[in-house]
Image: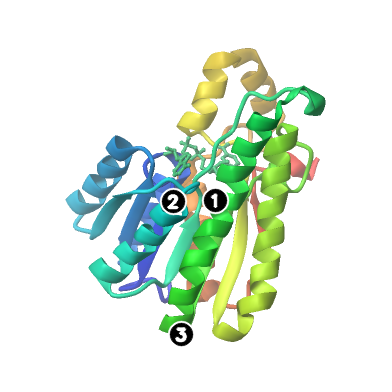
């Protein structure tokens, strides 16, 4: 894809699922990749996969709830590869869900801290370096739960918030040549969903039956969208929640 080759990308949650696939996809297009995750084994596996395909990648243990970790993640891109062009702010958590009034405050705070404030911490560290570089492109992972009532209340609130951040960042930093978009996956076959399927296989079967595509999404299909959004092929796509859901929300 246009403009990805020789760029530098950071991917949070790069040790598994969607983030692993976007890390691989950036590397296939010739970008150098900083893979960031709390999961050290998963993160190293991703960098090994990239290196065995002839790409360049570095793992840095990063908890997106920790500003110092996030600053160190961006610094790794500068130290290892000389700058930062692309970011996929993707690390996130989910839960099996209950009704809004049944969550306690600690559960609410944790969900928002990882899924929403974590994206803000990443943006805060990434944007100054992209300005320094003369521009860049960012994709934040939201969800179909960011544009509908799919998902539990605190998850949906966090993912709606990611779209708000994406829109505001677009308005604030368009003049600096940085594009921001959000990707809104439907139900994607990753460890997050596989775990939910193990907890309640009947519910996952019911959800799958309601997807017009007739199947779960492949994380690769989200990665393709992420890297396209970062490429010059998407040069006029700004501030958008891009839904990739096999038609789930079409009905
Ligand atoms: N799988 C789906 O159906 C689906 C649908 C919509 C949105 N999403 C979103 O996509 C993103 C990726 O999810 P996935 O399905 O690949 O899940 P996953 O569980 O396979 O991967 C998530 C990764 O994020 C990492 N992570 C969690 N907390 C972190 C933290 N505090 N700091 C750094 N890393 C952390 C995990 O270690 C893991 O490697 C999440 O934001 C999720 O909410 C997933």
Q: Name the residue carrying label 3.
A: 134
Q: Residue at x 55, y 43 (%)?
A: 114
Q: Residues within 10 Å of mark 1 (few under 14, many from 20)?
A: many
Residue 86 falls in image quadrant:
bottom left
Residue 167 falls in image quadrant:
bottom right
Residue 31 visible, this angle = no
Mark 2: is the Cβ under 8 angstroms from ligand 1?
yes
Query: Can you say whether 217 is above or below 22 in the image?
Result: above
Q: Give the x, y percent position of residue 116.
A: 62, 49
Mark 1: is the Cβ under 8 angstroms from ligand 1?
yes
Left or right of 40? Residue 208 is: right
If the image is split into quadrants, where does the C terminus sit? top right
Query: Can you say whether 25 is above or below 41 in the image?
Result: below
SS class of the residue under badge 1? Answer: helix
Residue 81 falls in image quadrant:
bottom left
Q: Give the x, y percent position of residue 50.
A: 25, 52
Q: Residue at x 70, y 52 (%)?
A: 161
Q: Give the x, y percent position of residue 88.
A: 48, 58
Left or right of 15? Residue 66 is: right
Q: Residues within 10 Å of mark 2 (few under 14, many from 20)?
A: many
Left or right of 146? Residue 137 is: left
Query: Which label lies toward us, 1 or 3?
Result: 1
């Amino acid at each position: 894809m246009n403009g990805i080759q020789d760029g530098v990308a950071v991917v949070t949650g790069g040790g598994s699922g969607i983030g692993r696939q976007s890390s691989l996809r950036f590397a296939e297009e010739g970008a150098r990749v900083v893979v960031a995750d709390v999961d050290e084994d998963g993160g190293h596996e991703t960098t090994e996969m990239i290196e065995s395909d002839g790409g360049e990648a570095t793992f840095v243990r990063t908890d997106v709830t920790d500003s110092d970790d996030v600053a160190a993640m961006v610094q790794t891109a500068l130290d290892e590869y000389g700058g930062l062009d692309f970011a996929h702010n993707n690390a996130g958590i989910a839960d099996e869900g209950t009704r809004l009034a049944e969550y306690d405050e600690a559960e609410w705070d944790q969900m928002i801290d990882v899924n929403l404030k974590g994206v803000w911490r990443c943006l805060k560290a990434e944007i100054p370096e992209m300005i320094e570089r003369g521009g860049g492109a960012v994709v934040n992972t939201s969800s179909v739960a960011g544009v509908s009532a799919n998902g539990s209340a605190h998850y949906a609130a966090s993912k709606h918030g990611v779209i708000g951040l994406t829109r505001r960042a677009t308005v604030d930093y368009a003049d600096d040549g940085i594009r921001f978009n959000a990707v809104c996956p439907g139900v994607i076959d990753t460890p997050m969903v596989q775990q939910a399927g193990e907890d309640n296989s009947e519910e996952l079967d019911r959800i799958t039956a309601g997807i017009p595509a007739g199947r779960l999404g492949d994380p690769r299909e989200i990665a393709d969208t992420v890297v396209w959004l970062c490429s010059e092929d998407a040069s006029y796509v700004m501030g958008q929640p891009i839904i990739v859901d096999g038609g789930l929300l079409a009905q």
